[in-house]
Image (tube, coloured by chain):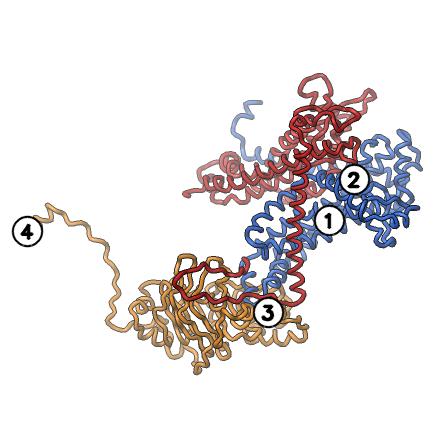
Amino acid sequence: MLDRLREPWSDRRAERTLGALACLVLIAIVLMIVFVAVRAWPSFHHNGLAWFSGRGDIDQQIGVQVNTGANPTRADYTIGAWPLIWGTILTTGFAVVIGVAFSVLTAIFIVEFAPGPLRRLIVPVVRLLAAVPSVIYGLIGILVLVPFVTNHLVGEGRKESVQYVINLSGTGLLVSVVILTVMITPIMIAIIVDALYAVPRGWKEGAVALGVNRWRAMWTVSVRAARPAIIAGAVLACARALGEAIMLSMVSGSKGFAPNPADGITFIFEPLRPLASTIVEDAESLNAPAVQATVYSFALLLLASSFFLSIAAWIAKQSMRKYGVR
Amino acid sequence: MIEETEVRNPRPPLPPPVRRIVVDSPPTVVAPAAVDQSAARPERSPAGPERMTLDSLSVFYGANHAVKEVSLPIRQGEVLALIGPSGCGKTTLLRTLNRLTELTPTARREGTIALDGQDIDLLEVTELRRRVAMVFQQPNPFPMSIFDNVAYALREQSRKRPSKPVVQPLVIDALQRAGLYDEVRDDLERPALRLSGGQQQRLCIARAIATRPEVLLMDEPCSALDPRSTAVIEELIGDLRRDLAIVIVTHNLQQAYRVGDRVAFMYLGDLVEYGPTEQVFGAPRAQRTRDYVGGAFG
Amino acid sequence: MAVAPHTEPLKPLRPPRKRRVNESVRTWRWSDRIALVLCWATGIALCLIAGAIVLYMGVKGLQFLKLDMIFSRPQASADQQGSGGFLDPILGTVLLTLIGIVLATPVAVATAIWIVEYGRPSWLARGVESGIEIVAGTPDIVIAIFGLALFQQGLFSPLSFTAEGGAVFGRSFLTAGAMMSLIALPMVFGATREGLQAVPMHLREASYGLGKTKIATIRRVLLPAVKPNISTGAALGMGRIAGDTAIVVVLLGATLRIDPEGSIPGTNVLRGTGGTLTSYVYNNSPAGEGNAEQKAYAAAFVLLLIVIALNFAVDLIARRGAKTGLESTRLGA
């Protein structure tokens, strides 16, 4: 048999082998969906649609599940994931919206207005920022920003106004959104800058030759032509924000509490915990079946969300093809 | 005797014969023989006032002296054709007229260009480009609908964005003047990039003339198009002449003959000859002009 | 290209230059002026934030990093401030990165070659490409617990510790490395595919014209041409593996020291649990159990240096590859 391996491979054999290796990826994905869904099923089965609602203190519910150990009763599977879902929506939503605006403006600055030496400095800096591990962002957050917010921004009066419901400290929505935004912007900036540089010169010259000022030429032609890249960057950033577990578990306050916008400004100081952070924090107790079902159900929701994101982005890009923007 | 010498010192082989142009009679213009010369050129109306004046214009790209002290007038109602071989500086000259050379960092300009008596260096550059419009060699319609393309300049140049009912008649008028309206009237919201090459170029012309500029610069507008579109655009140029001063750069001598009222021949940055078309093509004063229009080099 | 204000070099013996009027912001609409201010503000803010992060980590890191920390093993003691270093986490990072990239690169390169050079049937090729995009977009925490579910099956018991009752632990360097390869795969694949698509057709045609089979062409012509791309992708993948924490916490145990499992030297480390620099920083921060800030800063500084070095390597390879890679195979250049 070794002799057969040593002789020069025929094209057909090579094609089959390479194709088989390529299919490994598909197999991995199918396995992932199957395993996660199978382990998540009990939680959905016992809760039905109420899984998505808020059914009380979720930290308490998870605590019960951890304590039941190997033989949970039917009632132990109770979980109402809404506070975690709301926390995820808040952090991801704010971070992506602020991040896209920030990235587009910064990319325009880099391409059009930045003086030469500054531009040559910024581009490698942006790429470096995109490579910094999330745990370092979390470290800076928890050792610098959180004490700052605790000592200077959250006053006694604010704490008293909500002290019957929740305990305010520096960790919470504000620091989470700030650091998450800083984390996701570099990759978006890099994508948008590349797209702005790739806009055909004819369009840029045509706009300038019509007597339109620099900003308007950039905004109405180049940025418009770069819209697919902006969407691609936003989807990438959204996926990263959704899945961010470690950094957010350090700075979000780690309480299964749904921040209440009706509280006014205090709303941004309230603690929360997104889905991904919950998975990481409960990963040690995964052997108890009830906890396992709960945690895998969160993972299935995250998986479904990133899947829908990709589809939504694809649809948005298709609709832009009409006008010739690639 | 000669044979002896040849055996002892064989003559070196002669170089291949050189084609010489013998000009003992004035060369005929290179228009196709079948075309009646008087009918090939559109009716010339008397030229209007002088719109732009170039005075000792020189352009440097770094150390390269691309345009050497050119002085020319550009009059309304007249088409000025810039001809010359590749690299002679005609495109550079065209691009200085609306200060587009400033997009290149190494470009440097000396001399004066005046628009209606005003030095264009002292004019706001966006203001200048609204009065001196340009059509490029490759059609470059924006990735928007036909209507948005033509309305682009109208909307972006004004201080306050005009509403659609205000803009619409101006767009239709520009499309009519560009000879494109009949072909696209049924759906103006179609994406501009779906048009054919010739239609796209006419769309670019419509876009350029929508804001009623004073001068229209055209950089080899037909070189990327098929002959039928070329003919349509040349007819268009004849119609547009009345209200505008047109400067067209072309490497196609027949086109320069058909379209131009005055011709400027440039060679390696120098303005070799300038004058009415019949004179430059029929009785050129400079030897080099004679060689070029006679086809000796291209 | 930007319309930059033109500054001319001074030339003696010429008439004085007249001031050229460029675009003045005075003619802009109000909304345009606000936008210009915002652009400048965000640009400056980005520089300040980046500078602050780099400077802060640098200062704190140098303040707390002592050389013996890199070479001494961590010690489990009540007073984390004074004891031990983080040699084990560093070794853990290196080991995990190696396992991950060694597993990912062949599969990624093979997939890229199959997609670009063969790609039949086309629905399968589109499926594989979409699949890789899905993997790239999946959160690493989901991949981590998928790995846990997968490797806790009895089939994979040799890969990690098995308890008496038959319950497979599922956590080891091998299992974590396998999942790390999954997250590095899209980067190597993307870089290789770009490189292959950039190779001009005439190179392949020249090789076929000489009578070479497709697989020989791939081995002798295409693979050498895209070596810099593969290296770039691998460096990017290694950067991502080195910075990942979630998979380490779930699939590696995130312990302080490397705990080998079993008796065979070599594989016992692979089957054992351990920690990496990322989990070490996490554990020593106020969010974890250690609560030793200085150690966290020092370890974070080392981690940052590793990531910067990998980034720098990517730049170097890309620049050097662009100069010598394809040009050396270009015909007649």
Give the residue type at disc 4.
Met
The disc label shown at residue B153, or none: 3
The secondary structure type at the circle numbered 1 is helix
The residue at the point 48 percent across, 63 percent down is: B101
The quarter of the image holding the C terminus of chain B is: bottom left
Looking at the image, tell me whether mark 1 or mark 2 is earlier in sequence order.
2
- The residue indicated by pointer 4 is B1
**C124 lies left or right of B260:** right
Determine the CA span between mark 1 and mark 4: 97 Å
Q: Chain of mark 2?
A: A
Residue to which mark 1 is pinned = A309
Mark toward the viewer: 2 or 4: 2
Task: From the image, state the color of chain C.
Answer: red
**Residue under mark 4: which chain is it in?**
B
Q: Is residue C213 visible?
A: no
Secondary structure at numbered mark 3: helix
The blue chain is: A
On the same chain, marks 1 and 4? The answer is no
Q: Give the residue type that dot 2 points to.
A: Ser
Evaluate if marks 2 and 4 touch, with contact meaning CB atoms under 8 Å apart: no
